[in-house]
Image (cartoon, rainbow, N blue to C red):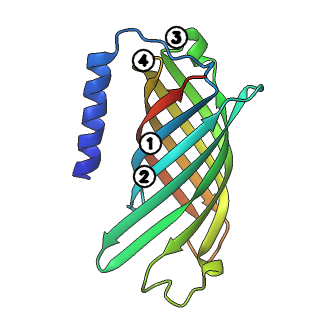
Amino acid sequence: MKKINSIISIFVIALLSWGSGFSQTTDNAQSVEVRFGKSLMPAMYAAIKYERVTSTPTNVSAKLFYESMQKNSLDYSCFGLDILGDYYTPVGDNTDHLFECKLGFGGTVQIENEPWVYKEYPVSNRLNYGLVGEFAGEWAMSEAFSLTTFLQQKYLFNKNLSHTNFLFGVGIKFNIPD
């Protein structure tokens, strides 16, 4: 928890000291984002997200993620892939793209690991899949970099494993110029 508080503090300080009216461009063809956060399981969360601009109002993104938790001799980990359609709301138009809000919806697949609980489960039984919804905010530090926050809810279909997963966190996004 101290690591998350430290990371959030650094991002807030950077935002307040750097926020001098930069505008992010939404014309970039692609971006890469590094995210850190926490789930309510409670597990630490890290992800690398790639977003591609399309000719429609909805962009496409893919995210590789990893979750890890160690508590009371429980050594849980999970890794997976989220694929979402990201819709930028009109908020960015009203703020000259200094602040963006976006909604995402898509699918998720993940493999859950724990050497004691899932010891006898083959990979096919540890595989969990479902739907994911996300709300994210972006604050432009420059045309290339943005600070992000996100809230994410997953609904998983494998009844032997967890059914829902709520995540929240922060990230930094790099807009790749054309």
Is the residue under label 2 in contact with that under label 1 (CB below 8 Å)?
yes
Question: Is residue 162 visible in this depiction of the protein?
Answer: no
Element class at badge 2:
strand
Q: Residue at x 25, y 26 (%)?
A: 13
Element class at badge 1:
strand
Q: Nearer the viewer, residue 172 or 131?
A: 172
Image location of residue 105, percent across then percent down: 67, 43
Task: Decide: is 72 above or below 135.
Answer: below
- Dot placed on the residue nearer the N-terminal end, 3 or 1: 1
Q: In the picture, residue 56 is in which quadrant? A: top right
- Tell me the CA gap for discs 1 and 2: 8 Å
Which residue position holds label 3? 95
Question: Is residue 107 visible in this depiction of the protein?
Answer: yes
- Tell me the CA gap for discs 2 and 3: 29 Å
Is the residue under label 1 in contact with that under label 3 (CB below 8 Å)?
no
Q: Residues within 10 Å of mark 4 (few under 14, many from 20)?
A: some
Q: Residues within 10 Å of mark 2 (few under 14, many from 20)?
A: some
Question: Which labelled disc corresponds to residue 34?
Answer: 1
Which residue position holds label 4? 142
Q: Residue at x 29, y 47 (%)?
A: 4
Image location of residue 60, percent across then percent down: 68, 38
Image location of residue 92, percent across then percent down: 57, 16
Question: Which labelled disc corresponds to residue 46?
Answer: 2
